[in-house]
Amino acid sequence: MISKSMQDALNRQISLEQYSAQLYLALSAHCEGKSFRGFAHWLRVQSGEETAHAVKLVDFLLDRGGKLELQVVPVPTAQLGGIIQVFEQVLAHERGNTAKINALFEQARAEKDYASEITLQWYVSEQVEEEATVSQIVDHLRAVGDQGGGIWYLDSKMGKRGKA
Ligand code: FEO
């Protein structure tokens, strides 16, 4: 049986993953509106991944006899500017999420909740991968700038991302 404190913390993280899905969906729509269909596609796939992250935690919570307590997911507060700004926001958001995951991991360890610790290990690794991927995208965007042919080349590359 999971502790009440870990149940509450996991419920908060489930909401955060859902917020991430909403944020990336909003950013995807913004890119689509600028005819950057590749960036839009990448963000749409990422939105789906965030939903999957939430559901994976829901399954874990229920397997442990916990109670799912859904919370209101806020409307995303994205700054809808150029593509560089969009992905800088994604990177900042993922860095914030990493801090939340690390705090959850620390809590599991402090409570000697080994099952949660093992499940959260996957999220720790996932954050390393996500931050590295988005950081590289931001580097490429900064290198080519918001104007010119380079950004359309990147857009076509981003459109090749497989479905989540
Ligand atoms: Fe669910 Fe982008 O981490």
Image: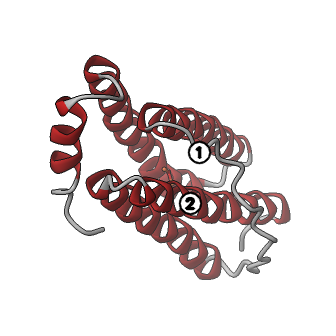
Identify the residue under disc 1.
80
Q: Is residue 164 above or below residue 145?
A: below
Protein image colouring: secondary structure
Q: Is residue 22 above or below residue 66?
A: above
Where on the picture, by quarter, is residue 164?
bottom left
Residue sitting nearer the eye, 63 or 19: 19
Residue at image x 62%, y 66%?
18
Q: Which label is found at residue 26?
A: 2
Residue sitting nearer the eye, 22 or 96: 22
Q: Position of residue 40 (x, y in %)?
A: 36, 57
Residue at image x 72%, y 44%?
107
How far is mark 1 from mark 2, CA to CA? 9 Å
**What's the amino acid at mark 1?**
Leu
Residue sitting nearer the eye, 122 or 69: 69
Mark 1 closeness class: few <14, some 14–19, many ≥20 residues within 10 Å? few
Where on the picture, by quarter, is residue 129?
top left
Q: Secondary structure at mark 2?
A: helix
**Number of the front mark, 1 or 2:** 1
Q: Position of residue 41 (x, y in %)?
A: 31, 61
Q: In the rendered view of the protein, which quadrant contains the N terminus? A: bottom right
Q: Is residue 95 left or right of residue 137?
A: right
